[in-house]
Image (cartoon, rainbow, N blue to C red):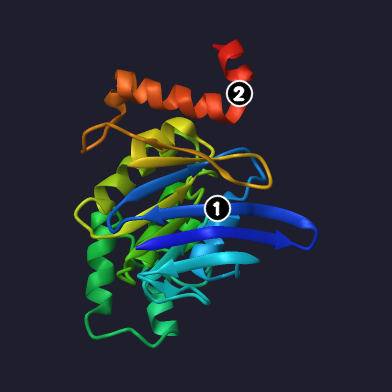
Amino acid sequence: MIRLDRVTKSFGSVEALQDVSLEVAPGEFVAIVGASGCGKSTLLRLVAGLVRPSAGHVALDGRPVTEPRAETAMVFQAATLLPWADVLRNVTFPLRLMRRAGGDTEARARALLATAGLAGFEHRLPRELSGGMQQRVAICRALLQDPRVLLMDEPFGALDALTREEMSLELLRIWQGREMAVVFVTHSIPEAVLLADRVVVMSPRPGRIAEIIPVELPRPRGFEQEGLPAFQAAARRIRALIYGGRAAHAA
């Protein structure tokens, strides 16, 4: 569904990504991890059509990605909600902006908010919500577009640890049952292993794919699986790739 073929991206004299090839299947959940500055966010922006590759090709369903596409939605670390609009208007805003809102848009938005545990908050302003609730609104806003691809750039990075765990499980619950590919950037190795079917480990800049780790854990997932040998083995391998000998020394 998503295909990056020998993609390189430079910003002036700085090479952010080098010779990256990756395929993501429909409905697959792929996490991307690596040190700061390794090109994780750049990779997402290439798939979103927000930037163009310096070399190589990015395609969605076999068609080149040259600009943002309606079937792709993105969630950032900050919820980026409109401060003057209530929750319901924030969720429906992109469809109204693209003139794709229909007679059932508000009903669908309310149903999504209920699924995300936000029933009764439709007319609250962003400042009246917690950080976790704001991020739920941002996810609902993305999902209302019925995307086939959901790109998430450290969406829980600004949340406290407990809210982050809650949001991870909430995301899995919403994703399951949807034919939607997710590409999820995170700095958290346990979060990546918990969520993903495969974890893509990036090398330091210029970012290359060091290794792709399959996560052999049954779904539905939960934090009780963190103690399983498969979880621990995947996390150890990812740490070894990112930190090298420092991971083994720390262990």
Can residue 77 be seen? no
Res. 20 mark: 1
**Amino acid type, label 2:** Gly
* Label located before the other in sequence (1 or 2): 1
Q: Position of residue 182 (x, y in %)?
A: 37, 54
Q: Left of 146 or right of it: where is 65?
A: right
Give the SS element for disc 1: strand
The residue under the point 61% across, 11% down is 249
The crowd level at tag 2 (other Cα within 10 Å; few <14, some 14-19, many 20+) is: few
Q: Quadrant of the C terminus?
A: top right
- Of 34 and 6, the residue lying toward us: 6
Q: Left of 121 or right of it: where is 78?
A: right
User: How many marks on residues?
Assistant: 2
The crowd level at tag 1 (other Cα within 10 Å; few <14, some 14-19, many 20+) is: some
- Of 202 and 166, the residue lying toward us: 202
**Amino acid type, label 1:** Val
Q: Position of residue 45 (x, y in %)?
A: 55, 63
Q: Left of 109 or right of it: where is 81?
A: right
Task: Residue under label 2, please give it.
Answer: 244
Can residue 194 be seen? yes
- Of 49 and 111, the residue lying toward us: 49
